C-alpha cells in the first residue's frame, strides 16, 4: 500500500485493489453508499431509460467486484469496517433489485 487516499485531509493508505479509485476503503465505502442512494432515488421515479439502467448495472458490477477483491485480499480490518463492507454489498444488491423492478415496471407499462 504505497499510495495514500486522495480525499482532502486523509492520509490513509489505499489498498492495491482500490488504486484505480485512489481512495482508502472507508472513503470508497462512503462514495459507494452515496452513489447507490442517488441511483436508487433516480430509479424510484420510474422513468429511467434502458441505457441508464444498463449504466447503473455496470456500476453495481464494477464496484461489487472491487469490494469483493478488497474483502478477500487478506487486508486486516476491524469488525466495524467489516460490517461496513457487508453493508456496502447489501446496498449494491438492493440497488440491483431496484433496477430489476424498474425494468419490470417499464415492460409492463409498454406491454400493458
Image (cartoon, helix red, strand yellow):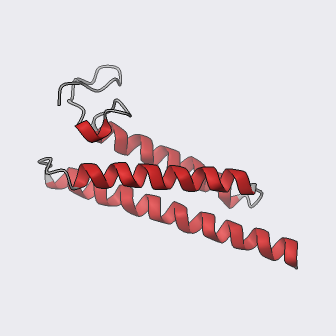
Relative side of 112 to 11, left or right: right
Q: Position of residue 18 (x, y in %)?
A: 31, 38
| 42 vs 58, nearest the viewer | 58
Q: Quadrant of the C terminus?
A: bottom right
Residue that lies at the very extreme toward the top in this rendered image: 9
| 22 vs 44, nearest the viewer | 22
- Residue 82 lies, with reference to residue 100, above or below; the image says above
Relative side of 45 to 10, left or right: right
| 45 vs 24, nearest the viewer | 24
Identify which residue is drawn at 34% across, 59% down.
Answer: 87
Relative side of 10 to 111, left or right: left
Q: Position of residue 89 (x, y in %)?
A: 37, 60
- Numbered label tally: 0
Identify which residue is drawn at 40% across, 63% down.
Answer: 90
Identify which residue is drawn at 38% across, 34% down.
Answer: 21
Q: Quadrant of the N terminus?
A: top left
Q: Position of residue 104 (x, y in %)?
A: 71, 73
- Residue 67 lies, with reference to residue 11, above or below; the image says below
| 104 vs 34, nearest the viewer | 104
- Residue 19 lies, with reference to residue 76, above or below; the image says above
Q: Position of residue 9 (x, y in %)?
A: 29, 20
Give the image quarter of residue 79: bottom left
Identify which residue is drawn at 24% across, 32% down.
Answer: 14
- Residue 74 lies, with reference to residue 93, above or below; the image says above
Give the image quarter of residue 68: bottom left
Amino acid at each position: 500500500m504505497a499510495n495514500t487516499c486522495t480525499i482532502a485531509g486523509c492520509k490513509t493508505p489505499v489498498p492495491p485493489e482500490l488504486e484505480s479509485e485512489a481512495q482508502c476503503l472507508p472513503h470508497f465505502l462512503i462514495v459507494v453508499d452515496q452513489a447507490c442512494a442517488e441511483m436508487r432515488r433516480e430509479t424510484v421515479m420510474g422513468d429511467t431509460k434502458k441505457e441508464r439502467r444498463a449504466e447503473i448495472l455496470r456500476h453495481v458490477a464494477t464496484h461489487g467486484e472491487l469490494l469483493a477483491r478488497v474483502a478477500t485480499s487478506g487486508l486486516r480490518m476491524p469488525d466495524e469496517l467489516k460490517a461496513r463492507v457487508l453493508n456496502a454489498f447489501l446496498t449494491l444488491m438492493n440497488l440491483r433489485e431496484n433496477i430489476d423492478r424498474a425494468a419490470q415496471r417499464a415492460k409492463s407499462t409498454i406491454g400493458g
